[in-house]
Image (tube, coloured by chain):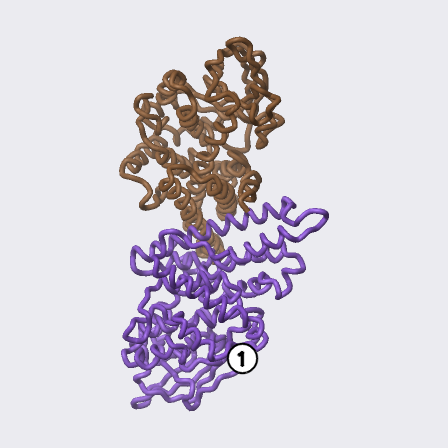
Chain colours: A purple, B brown
Amino acid sequence: MPYQTTPGLYNTEHEIFRETFRRFLLEEVEPHLEEWTENHGIPKEFWKKAGAAGVLGVDIPEEYGGPGGDFLFRLVIAEELGYSPAGATVGPAFIGDGVGEILHRCGTKEQCARWLPGMVKGEYRGALAITEPDSGSDVSATRTTAVRDGDEYVINGSKTYISNSVDADFFMVGCKTDPSKGSKGISVIIVEGDTPGFRRGRRLKKMGCNASMTGEIFFENVRVPVSNLMGEEGGGMKIMMGGVNMDRIMWPIIGHAAGTRAFEETVDFVKNRKAFGQTIFDFQNTQFKLAEIKTELAVGRAFIDTVIRNYKENGKLDMQLCAMAKLWGCEMEGRVIDQCVQLHGGAGYMDEYNVSKFYTAARLHRIFAGTSEIMRLLIARTI
Amino acid sequence: MTYPISPGIYSTEHDIFRETFRRFLQTEAEPYLEEWNEKHEIPRDFYRKAGAAGVLGVDIPEEYGGPGGDFLHRLVIAEELGYSPAGASIGSSFIGDNISHILYHNANEEQRRKWLPKMVTGEVRFAFAITEPDSGSDVAGMRSTAIRDGDEFVINGAKTFIGNANTADVVIFACKTKPELGGKGVSCIIVEMDRPGVSRGRKLRKMGMSAADTGEISMENVRVPVSNLMGEEGKGMNIMLGGVNSDRIVWPLIAHGAATRAFDETVTFVKNRKAFGQTIFDFQNTQFKLAEIKTELAVGRAFLDDVIRDYQANGKLDMLKCAMCKMWVPEMEGRVIDQCVQLHGGAGYMDEYHVSRLYTGARLHRIFAGTAEIMRLIVARSI
């Protein structure tokens, strides 16, 4: 059963692309999930296949080698990736492709020309490096510095929990070019992975999303030309926050699709599994729990549709609606998948059942791209 | 502070009517709520005023004395009644006006001409008697009977928890004309309350909605002409279920209106009330709770809009969506208003603060017009 799309949101092009992407996941990703999970990594050639299939950089314009689609193509990816067991395994790595959109929006022509065509083909991978050991949600506390020295920046510092840190070819690094100015002194500078003084640290083991590589990176007197600055000096917060709203609709969509898949797998499971002389589905408790889940999913989708329609009407994402979607959508996903594991009984704890992986993946959704607590802070500011 | 209207659903006519109805509640209901709650009833005169103000039978066509509005006018009433403190005091009584909608759709021409014009002016009040001491949600289990005797039905039976039982002039009495057929033997018969053998029982005391009268009606060998049968014999279940779907969007709207009011009142309260050297709002816990409430309200409203748009697109209410709505929104309302009482502290327990009455008003919403459990049964049937 494919993910049910909402009528009236997408056009035929989006639906054709959806088919392509769904087939790509079925053929090129799902058969390899176990292996990649065991290896804690996705092979580099996978990204070239993704590029050849036309599922990377979907909203990058033709002049930079992309298909020139719109933001809704990324939402289609989120829906299909979330619904597939692939989402719970390679999700953060794959969604990392979204840094191309940030580069296109905020980078110089030279930077775009240098990296985007390769990203679309899957030859180059980029990573956005914000979080540090001592600063997570509080980005203004960033300690990594970039000090100007002639035509170069000299970068020192360390970053952690960075998606794709292990295999990225370049990093968009949040660092302070003017530490005296707090968050207004933050800039984003591109650092290539082979620059002297740049070092990759441990590959971090996680409770879920195992195939997605996450790790640490270190900068020790790393020298890059000033032309590697993205946007304006001191404009780093704006660049990072620009991508954040996008994440805050993508992840609730992934969460909703994962919740939907977990629900459907659970319905199949309980209708087949017998106990005490009847199927698990025959117990009224099961039916009532499933009725609650189905309702929560319907309610959640109505809200996501509201956010998307609002985007289509205004041409930009509404910050408050995105914060609400991220908060509510991902917490709903957590409640739903927790119940799905429960209805599976012991099987739900085994990785051979998808709900087990959905459960640990879902736990991440309430934390990254802005924790639930940060979302509450943002919403509270509007009250 | 007014209830925020969803854009794109209502026409200018609805908005004008909304103003009229809001003003009507403010001038003719809100000043008297305390008095009516004390007396456990609403004076007869109020409904005549309502008729004169044009807020009764809003979707009844002009040929039957109505203003010829549409079903959305009833939804406007639900939103405004819910948002007003009047909803928590007189709500279930006022919404009894929806019986005119049921009568219009099911009664014959003669019955329509006889009753509708007087319902619209507020001269005649109707009750709809379904629930019995031994049958609530399980309507097919009712025991009241109407046995044909020549040109008359002879009705026997007792009903309880009937809205407007003590003040109604006429009751639509659900009873079995063919008891041997179970649910298929149920019919709806119009019975004037002054017929011999009709008696009103106790006025029931409730935890909330005190002004709305609720009571018992019993019939002992009550004779009515067979022409008082509403709709076809044996089709009573269809008539009741037809009205039920509209209740299942009306009550969630009232619930959403009430929860929104509770939220607005709470924001005002916590921003003014001081404790430990700051306002209650300054505590992060307060801000986070309010952020959650604001989000739940936004999510719930998106779902209500979805159900209404679906109605507009298809010309009828979707049973599954209405059941989801009736289950989820009043449960959300319960969570929200419970927190609003908490944030008010001791004040929240006092009837002089609206949240106190909104709280007891809300408790009913999960029970009547189909309990949350019946909604789960209906939703589960679709799985």
Badge 1: residue crowd in 10 Å (few <14, some 14–19, many ≥20): many
Q: Is residue A129 above or below residue A81?
A: below
| Residue B351: percent from left, percent from top | 49, 36
| Residue A315: percent from left, percent from top | 29, 60
Query: Residue most toward the right?
Result: A276
Q: Amino acid at mark 1?
A: Arg
Q: Which residue is mark 1?
A: A203
Left of A371 or right of it: where is B136?
A: right
Q: Is residue B347 visible?
A: no
Question: At 64% across and 62% down in the image, what residue appears?
Answer: A349
Q: Which image quadrant is residue B215 in?
A: top right
Name the one closer to the observer, A32 or A77.
Answer: A32
Q: Is residue B229 above or below residue B8?
A: above
Q: Which image quadrant is residue B28 in?
A: top left
| Residue A313: percent from left, percent from top | 30, 55
| Residue B186: percent from left, percent from top | 55, 23
Left of B257 or right of it: where is B187?
A: right
Number of numbered callouts drawn:
1
Chain identifier of the residue bearing label 1 in the image: A
Q: Is residue A80 above or below residue A165?
A: above
Q: Is residue A71 above or below residue A140?
A: above
Q: Is residue B189 visible?
A: yes
Does dot 1 land on a helix, a strand or a loop? Answer: strand
Name the one closer to the observer, A345 or B203.
Answer: A345
